[in-house]
Amino acid sequence: MNSHISLENLREEASFRYATEADCAELFDLYRLFYEEAVYKDYLDYDEEKVQHVVSHGIRTDERPHIVAVVDESVVGFLSFWFDRTFSRQPCMVLLEFYVHPDFRRSAIGRGLVALAVLEGRHAGAGAFHAPIASGMPAARTLINLFAKAGFEPLGWVMRRKL
């Protein structure tokens, strides 16, 4: 466990940057772990080819940027997002996926990813950052606390129905 990565030593222990196509293999591994933990598997079948296409295309075109956390030259976490420009003058930043490898939870990695995403949203002129959190996820309470500490507030509900 790497809980020794605190806010005080985060810059020395980890680096953060935008993902490139060279990171895709490691991201695919993390997506697989993410899905194994997610509530989605009870409703949807995992498709490795789809993940590879969507993630690599999104990184290559910048339609689905990923901020990655790197420790000892390995990607240990990521946060992906997009900018919704459907109905407003300024974009709304929307969280797509957020995952930190279990070995790096209870460290400052997640807080670092969220803080950088907020900065990127401001830099892009976004008026808001929506971060949906699936309530059935084991880490939901931790994520809610993490986002609350970063200044987020609750906004509505996500409803689901199995088809």
Image (cartoon, helix red, strand yellow):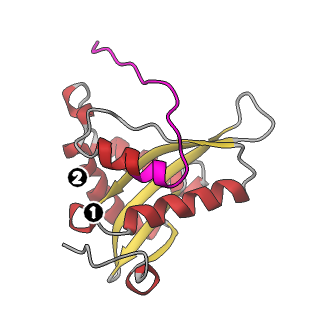
Give the amino acid at mark 2: Leu
| Dot label at residue 33 | 2
Q: Secondary structure at mark 1?
A: loop
Q: Quadrant of residue 46?
A: top left
Task: Tell me what residue is drawn at x 38 percent, y 67 percent.
Answer: 109
Q: Nearer the viewer, residue 102 or 20?
A: 102
Q: Quadrant of the C terminus?
A: top left
Q: Position of residue 96 (x, y in %)?
A: 47, 43
* For the residues bearing labels 2 and 1, Cβ distance under 8 angstroms: no
Task: Tell me what residue is drawn at x 26 percent, y 33 percent.
Answer: 136
Numbered range of the magenta stretch: 146-163
| Dot label at residue 105 | 1
Q: Image height check: is 3 above or below 39?
A: below
Task: Tell me what residue is drawn at x 53 percent, y 62 percent.
Answer: 115
Query: Is 85 left or right of 131, judged from the image as shown?
Result: right
Q: Position of residue 145 (x, y in %)?
A: 39, 49
Give the amino acid at mark 1: Arg
